[in-house]
Image (tube, helix red, strand yellow):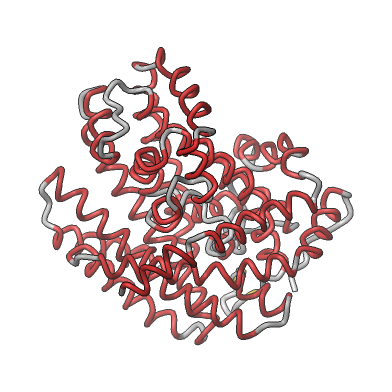
Amino acid sequence: MELLQWWNKRVLWGPPMLLLMLGCGIYFTWLTKGLLFRKWRMVLRCTAGSLFRSGGRKKSGGVSPFQAVSTALAATVGTGNIVGVSVAVMQGGAGAVFWMWVSALIGMMTKFSEVTLAVAYRRKNKQGEWVGGPMYYISKGIGSKGLSLCFCIFGVLCSFGIGNMVQANAMAGSLNQVFRIPCWMTGLAASLLAGLVLIGGMKRISEIAGFLVPFMALFYMVASGIVLVRQYQEIPCAFAMIFRQAFTPKAAAGGMCGAGMAQAIRIGVARGIFTNEAGLGSAPIAHASAQTDHPVKQGMWGAFEVFFDTIVMCTVTALVLLSSELFDPCGEGELMIQQVFARAFAGGRYVVPVGLTLFAFASVLAWFYYGARCMEYLAGEEAVSWYRGIYVILIFAGCVMGLTTVWEFADFFNGMMAVPNLIALLLLAPEVKRLTDDFFGGKGRSRQN
């Protein structure tokens, strides 16, 4: 176990992985001449702006682009946006928030690229559903069956750990702490509800995500808005603190060694922040199911996903904490954020536990889809029913078990899942550029085969 901890901390989630992830985003930004920055107004118009136009959320006969991104956000918007940010601030100072922004701006291009490739190389299964993800652009794009199998194996194992048991454990612990609900009772309820949703496949998961993600985001943003209105005079000071500490020796060290998430790689990337999963390869699996006529259109939704998850959600949490008179650089982040909400308004003490429960349950649903698609690739569509049964059982197990060992293996599988994906992204960079030029040049339709 000590060897695994060393490997996770020093290698897999250390400088080598940091350089690979950040380098990938920087390379794609250079290759496309800063595409997302040059075309940001168009990205917003084609993503969030489309929701206000007729039919923006609906696509007949399949999963809409909004439902696909909601499924991906269900996996990424989670405990990291609340507890993870507060821990990052405690570990890396207020300046860690600045490095989060930097990593998100770089990660948007990585997510854009992997989502674009996922749609370009997807195919239809026996049910007529679009299926895609890194395993398909690895095998079809760079011709490596071995790397695609490795990605899927780690994807299945990762879904059992970080996508299932870890989330279930956080959900049960939060409800038990505040509402005194026994963990076994949470486990039974979560397993039953998840089973009812998961049996409906991607269509039902995407429908639930399309409702749950906007609801839980609105719930948290409204609660945070109330706090920020009460503390509005301190918000400029909070921003000043972020920028000032971003370039102090302590914070700068955290930023350079923590992928912009926090001072420690372990805290910032592997131990629960998961602000956007750019480069991991999981979210493209959900995006590949969307009904769209060009891969780049869905790629823009991938970029927006990173922006909303990190630039918006994580920044709100940071400002709630940093603008409060309760903020103590030497305090405990999770407890402090709970106290800030509890002090701000009646019922505020329930914001964190309710938010964590909603976020964690949504993550469980989304990660099932990721794992199911990986299992389908490995063993065929018939194996998905067996996978579903095991997955539901592990939800209950996660609620009632201690997960120290599971965390270590989850971090390992998470990192190993990213390696083949990042290799493929770099090798397929010319294809990303071709598709991007094709779309913005007004020439093309999607490549589906």
Identified at 66% across, 75% down, the residue is 138
Identified at 32% across, 65% down, the residue is 407
The front one of 394 and 412 is: 412
Numbered disc total: 0
Where is residue 250, by image quadrant? top left
Please identify the quadrant where the C terminus is shown.
Answer: bottom right
The front one of 411 and 4 is: 4
Compared to residue 96, the image places residue 292 above or below, namely below
Residue 386 horizontal/vertical position (percent): 37, 82
Compared to residue 151, the image places residue 439 above or below, namely above
Please identify the quadrant where the N terminus is shown.
Answer: bottom left
**Is residue 215 among the parts visible in the rendering?**
no
The front one of 386 and 64 is: 386
Residue 403 horizontal/vertical position (percent): 25, 65
Considering every residue shown, the one lying at the far top of the view is 233
Identified at 38% across, 27% down, the residue is 322
Is 149 left, or right, of 119 in this rendering?
left
Identified at 19% across, 67% down, the residue is 401
Residue 134 horizontal/vertical position (percent): 61, 70
Is 147 left, or right, of 235 in this rendering?
right
Is 245 left, or right, of 148 in this rendering?
left
Compared to residue 141, the image places residue 331 above or below, namely above
Is 147 left, or right, of 249 in this rendering?
right
Residue 149 horizontal/vertical position (percent): 56, 82
**Is residue 185 among the parts visible in the rendering?**
yes
